[in-house]
Image (cartoon, coloured by chain):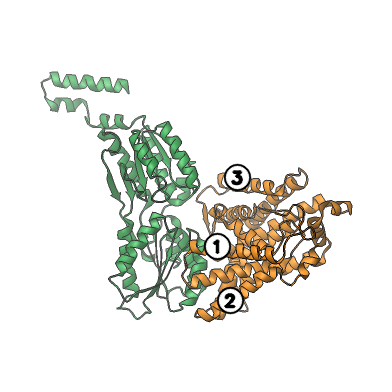
Chain colours: A green, B orange
Amino acid sequence: MKSALLRFAAIAVAALTVGGVTARAQDNMNDPYREPALNALKGKSIAYLPISIGFDLAQAWGGVIKTEADRYGMTFKARDPNWSTDAMAQAMTSLIAEHPDVIVTQNPDLQSLARLLKQANAAGIRVIQMNMQGAIQTDAFVGPDFISMGQQEAGMMAKACGKDTQTSHKIAIVQGVLTGGVSYYQVKGLLEGLKAHPEIKVVSSQAADWDASKARAVTETVLQQNPDLCGIVDVWDGQGVGTGAAIKQAGKQGQVYFLTSGGGAQSMCDRLEDGTFSAAINYDAPGMGRDAFTAISALLQSKQPAGSIKFQLYSPTRVMTKADVKAGTCWDPQAYAALLR
Amino acid sequence: MAVSRSKRSFSQERIVFLITIALFAVFAVELNNFLAPSNLLALVRSVAVLGMLGMAMLVVVLGRGIDLAIVANMAISVGWALQLIAGGMPVWLALCVGLAFALGMSLIGGILIAYAEIPSLFATLAMATFIYGFGRAHLITGTDVVYLPHDMGPVVQLGQGMVAGIPMPIVVAAATAFAAYLFLKYTKPGRFIFAMGDNFHAARIGGIGVRPMLVFQYVLSGSATFLAGLITATSVGAMNTRIVNSNMIYDVILVVVLGGVGLSGGRGGVRNVIVGTLLIGVLMNGMTIMDVQYTVQNVIKSLILLFAIVSDSIINPRDEQTGQQGDI
């Protein structure tokens, strides 16, 4: 690094002595901005602490960030609290003491990590929050705008089950963990959006705890209770597998419009293909990993102290149906998981 | 002792049974469609797996043990088998490997308890952590939810099939319960388990090979566990290994204890577990119909458990006759 700096300085001095003839300097060097950018990244450390490394979204984010970190000579290390908020808080505390340059994390809920994230920022560590905005805003948030996604879902449900259709107008919602942001904000947006469609009746809104078995049991009862149900929204495709299984086993595939959302792993394409999901909103988890690395790169190059620039990077989303599924449309979590091992 | 308790007119089993009947009656009157045959099937079906795990636990608890590793064993053994199938292994072979894993793990647990004489509570707690940790580190290396491969063949019927209009999970659970009943009631090893649970040392002096019997109990529990996992995976379409972190193991203990099976061993039977399981089924089904949130459902569930235990200890106070050393 030192020699690169020296060389750069030498070239700069040479360029100046020539009398500010920049055209001459460019003959010697391709791009005067490349070195400073690379130097801002080289040797920096990234710590990755999602709520678990065992699920597809976190594997894609981490896999992409690690690949890019390797490319620019940065160190990357991942911690796996395996769904335990306590273990996560402990890991965050020890990370603050280790003082990496950047922490990429994912809030399990609004409050649990808020104080620690503030502390990390105060200690000069840049903090990027994935998928769920906590109570504290840090350098960057990367994730879909779940409230507008909920509103979009309301619009789609209105199209499938609204007043222009010959249906019962009855829909059901399967939530995740009530306090989890992905679930909370999505349902909030959904209910807001449904206000414009008073004919639609939400007959059930139950939490399934991110567990497909619970989603299956809840949906089975709801379908039994409302045989004329028109549609179901499940806030995550991982548990939506169970919801879809219940619809299929009740013989209602095709009758019940089933909408869900997720990061676009292969399992999403498979379920769209076999008709388990009628439609899915894909927020492209590897794309989020790229956004996160872009944020890291921008923050490190900006040379501003941690926590001084704060921005929200909302991920693009895309509605997918069976027609959109082609080979390679979805990604394979195994490949990303292998990168993190 | 077991005889004197079950002869009482208001044993815990009776109390729980009455609560179940009462709740059932209230729901039947208050809720539309509660009595519809399809709802009753859904009700039983939703607790079929829980009941099967309850049977696995029963066999161990009757011998004054406890198996905290059953949920971990179920998730990892079935999850691994599914992953092997997705990787191209023939279905039957992968299932055999999964079953062998489940049996092997419960065998190790049983040996630790019977020969190394580690208390079952600690041995199985450690085994649960080991099975999950080993499984996630070396067997199920991708995502922690293993999806059902498309080409599973007839095995899928275990979770999705019907026999004479009755969903397969209920049929399998009923068959498991019946087999457990026959085993405990009419076979020698079954009676030995009661003897060991009632008085371990007397059973040993009486000539029962207590160590192999202990191992056998855990292996039996492991096989029921694998079957329960297979039903979960085929009916849901995925095996979620994350359930190891959930409170499912407490739910299993709940249905066993709720029905009146003593954790100190030797007391209870298949009927108790069925009663406990049905109460949970009726509760969950009714509350889902009423759209009660899942977190609130947990509160209500625990209140009912407390109510059953408190009324049991008021109606059947402990004394020197009924109390047993090692009662939890």
Bin the neighbour count of mark 3 within 10 Å (Cα to Cα): few under 14, some 14-19, many 20 and up: few
Q: How many marks?
A: 3
**Of marks 3 and 2, the one in the foreground:** 2
Q: What is the quadrant of residue B318 in the picture? A: bottom right
User: Where in the figure is residue B47, as x and y percent of width and height?
Assistant: 60, 67
Q: Secondary structure at mark 3?
A: helix
Name the residue carrying label 2. B24
Give the Cα distance between marks 3 and 2. 43 Å
Amino acid type, residue under disc 2 in the picture = Phe
> Which label was assigned to residue A148?
none
The chain identifier of the residue carrying mark 3 reads B
User: Where in the figure is residue B55, as x and y percent of width and height?
Assistant: 69, 63
Residue at (72% x, 56% y) in the render: B60
Q: Is residue B92 visible?
A: no
Asked if badge 1 and badge 3 are on a common chain, one would say yes
> Which label was assigned to residue B134?
3
Asked if badge 3 and badge 2 are on a common chain, one would say yes
Amino acid type, residue under disc 3 in the picture = Phe
User: Where in the figure is residue B290, as x and y percent of width and height?
Assistant: 48, 72
Q: Is A229 rendered above or below residue A63?
A: below
Name the residue carrying label 1. B151
Bin the neighbour count of mark 2 within 10 Å (Cα to Cα): few under 14, some 14-19, many 20 and up: some
> Contact, CB < 8 Å: mark 3 with mark 2?
no
